[in-house]
Image (tube, rainbow, N blue to C red):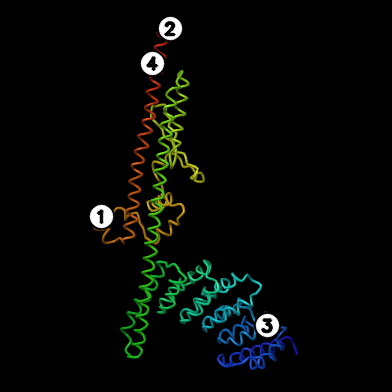
C-alpha cells in the first residue's frame, strides 16, 4: 500500500469514528455501547491525528453527548487522538473549539470535563482560558451559547471562576461588536440578561444600547409585514421580550452614569477639603516667616537677600504650584510657575504656553478634569456622560432640553471648579503683588537710610 493510499485509509477510519459518535443517542447510550463502537476504530488510528482539527472530542461536544465525553476523558488514548478543548477546527470549518460546540449544544456539564483534560493548568485559570477562546468571527463559547438561550452554560462558567477576568470575558465584544449582554438583549433572553447584570455585574457600553436599539427598530418595522397569525404571535412575543431587555440595558447604563457622576463629586469634595487644609497651614507659616524677616535688615545686601528668601519660601507653600517672582530690566514683574512634586513627571512648558493654550477646548476640558481626579478613569466617565465643551455655554432652556440630570450635575461641578480657580488666581495675584510691593518699600527705606548716613558722614 502506497503512502497516499495509507493516508486515504486512515482518513476513512476517522470518518467512521465521527459517524459512530454522531449515531449515539446522547440521552440513552451507555458506556458499554460507546466503548464497543469506538475502541476498535480508535485503536486503528491511535498513531495519527484527526484531520482538519475535527476530533472525537469536538464531535461529541457538538452532539452534547456527555457520556461520550466522559468515555474520552477516562480512555487511555492521548490528547493527540481524542482532541484538546482548546484546539480549533480549520478556519474553513469556522475555527470553533470543542468548547464552542458544547456551548451551541447547551452541554453545560462539559465544563468540568474540559477542565480535567487541562489538568496541567492552574485550576483558577482553566475556566478563564476556556471561556476566552475565540473562533474566526471573534466569538467566545459564551457568545455562542447565549443566542441559543443556553443560560446554564453561562452560569456554569461563572460558578467555576467568578472573578474580574471572567467578567471581562463576558464584556468582551466579538468582531461585530456584540457582547454577551447585547446578544442576550437582541434575542430576548431576559433571564440570561438578568444574570449578567445582577450576578455577574457586567458593565454596559453606549454602543451596546445603540446596537440593541437598532435591533428593536428593525423588529418593529418587520412586524408590519408578518401576516400569518401564528408566526405573528411568536414574533410579537419575542419583540416584547427584546423591548424588556432593552429597557434593562438603558436602566443599567443610566445607573453607571449616575454612579460615575457621584464618584466624581466625592473626589471633588475630597480635593476641596485637602485644598482648605493646605491653604490654611500655608498661610500660618508665611505669617511667621514674615515676622522673622522684619528684624533682620542690617544693610542693603542682607535686606535684599532676606526679601528674596521670603518670596521664595512664601510661594513654596502653594498647594498646586509655587511661583518665583523677579523684576525685569524694564520694571515689569515676571512670574515663573514651577511644577510641584506631584507634577514632576510632566514636561515644563515654555512660559508663553501658560498664556496662550494650544490644546483644543475638548482636550483642555479632559485635562482640567484629570488634574483633580488623578485616581479616576476620567476619559471613561466623560465618554459615558458624552460631555462636550459646548455644554458649558448652553442657555438654561438649552440645558433643560438637551442635558440629562447626570450631565447637569457634572457641568455644574466643572463651572464651580472654574469659579474657584478664578478666585484662587485672584488671591495668588494679590499675594504676589503684596510681596513685591513690600519688597520695594523696604528697599526704598534702606536706600533712604543709606543716603541719610552718607549725608551725616559728609
The numbered mark, 4 or 2, whose residue comes first in the sequence reads 4
Residue at the (58%, 71%) spot, across then down: 129
Which dot, 4 or 3, sits closer to the camera? 4
Out of 443 and 10, give the one closest to the viewer: 443
As drawn, is 269 to the left or to the right of 126? left
Cα distance in 3D space between marks 4 and 3: 103 Å
Cα distance in 3D space between marks 2 and 3: 113 Å
The extreme top residue here reads 458
> Where is mark 2, residue-wise?
457
Q: Secondary structure at mark 3?
A: helix
Picture quarter with the C terminus: top left
Q: Secondary structure at mark 2?
A: helix
Out of 206 and 457, give the one closest to the viewer: 457
Judge the density around disc 3: few (<14), some (14-19), many (≥20) Cα neighbours within 10 Å.
some
Cα distance in 3D space between marks 1 and 3: 72 Å
Cα distance in 3D space between marks 2 and 1: 73 Å
> Where is mark 3, residue-wise?
81
Number of callouts = 4
Check whether the beta carbons of the residues at disc 4 and disc 2 lie within 8 A of each other. no
Looking at the rendered structure, which numbered label has been put on residue 395?
1
The numbered mark, 1 or 3, whose residue comes first in the sequence reads 3
Amino acid at each position: 500500500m502506497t503512502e497516499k493510499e495509507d493516508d486515504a485509509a486512515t482518513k476513512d477510519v476517522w470518518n467512521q469514528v465521527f459517524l459512530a459518535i454522531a449515531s449515539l443517542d446522547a440521552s440513552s447510550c451507555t458506556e458499554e455501547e460507546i466503548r464497543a463502537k469506538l475502541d476498535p476504530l480508535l485503536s486503528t488510528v491511535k498513531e495519527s491525528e484527526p484531520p482538519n482539527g475535527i476530533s472525537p472530542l469536538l464531535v461529541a461536544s457538538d452532539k452534547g453527548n456527555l457520556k461520550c465525553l466522559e468515555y474520552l476523558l477516562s480512555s487511555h488514548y492521548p490528547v493527540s487522538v481524542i482532541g484538546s478543548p482548546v484546539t480549533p477546527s480549520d478556519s474553513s470549518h469556522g475555527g470553533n473549539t470543542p468548547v464552542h460546540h458544547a456551548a451551541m449544544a447547551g452541554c453545560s456539564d462539559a465544563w468540568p470535563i474540559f477542565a480535567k483534560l487541562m489538568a496541567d493548568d492552574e485550576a483558577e485559570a482553566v475556566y478563564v482560558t476556556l471561556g476566552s477562546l475565540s473562533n474566526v468571527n471573534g466569538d467566545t463559547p459564551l457568545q455562542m451559547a447565549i443566542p441559543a438561550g443556553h443560560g446554564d452554560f453561562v452560569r456554569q462558567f461563572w460558578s467555576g471562576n467568578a472573578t474580574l477576568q471572567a467578567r471581562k470575558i463576558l464584556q468582551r465584544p466579538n468582531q461585530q461588536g456584540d457582547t454577551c449582554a447585547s446578544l442576550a438583549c437582541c434575542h430576548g433572553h431576559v433571564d440570561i440578561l438578568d444574570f449578567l447584570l445582577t450576578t455577574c455585574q457586567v458593565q454596559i457600553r453606549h454602543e451596546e444600547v445603540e446596537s440593541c436599539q437598532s435591533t428593536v427598530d428593525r423588529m418593529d418595522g418587520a412586524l408590519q409585514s408578518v401576516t400569518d397569525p401564528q408566526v405573528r404571535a411568536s414574533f410579537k412575543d419575542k419583540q416584547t421580550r427584546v423591548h424588556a431587555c432593552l429597557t434593562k440595558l438603558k436602566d443599567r447604563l443610566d445607573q453607571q452614569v449616575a454612579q460615575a457622576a457621584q464618584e466624581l463629586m466625592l473626589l471633588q469634595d475630597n480635593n476641596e477639603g485637602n485644598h482648605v487644609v493646605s491653604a490654611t497651614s500655608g498661610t500660618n507659616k508665611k505669617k511667621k516667616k514674615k515676622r522673622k524677616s522684619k528684624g533682620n535688615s542690617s544693610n542693603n545686601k542682607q535686606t535684599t537677600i532676606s526679601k528674596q528668601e521670603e518670596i521664595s519660601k512664601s510661594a513654596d507653600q502653594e498647594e498646586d504650584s509655587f511661583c518665583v517672582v523677579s523684576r525685569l530690566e524694564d520694571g515689569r514683574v515676571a512670574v515663573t510657575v514651577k511644577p510641584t512634586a506631584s507634577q514632576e513627571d510632566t514636561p515644563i512648558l515654555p512660559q508663553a504656553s501658560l498664556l496662550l493654550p494650544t490644546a483644543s477646548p475638548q482636550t483642555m476640558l479632559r485635562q482640567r478634569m484629570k488634574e483633580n481626579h488623578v485616581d479616576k478613569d476620567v476619559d471613561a466617565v466623560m465618554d459615558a456622560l458624552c460631555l462636550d465643551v459646548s455644554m458649558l455655554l448652553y442657555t438654561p432652556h438649552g440645558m433643560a432640553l438637551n442635558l440629562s440630570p447626570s450631565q447637569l450635575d457634572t457641568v455644574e461641578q466643572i463651572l464651580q471648579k472654574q469659579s474657584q480657580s478664578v478666585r484662587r488666581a485672584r488671591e495668588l495675584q494679590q499675594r504676589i503683588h503684596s510681596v513685591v510691593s513690600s519688597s520695594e518699600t523696604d528697599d526704598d527705606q534702606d536706600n533712604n537710610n543709606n543716603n541719610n548716613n552718607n549725608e551725616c558722614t559728609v
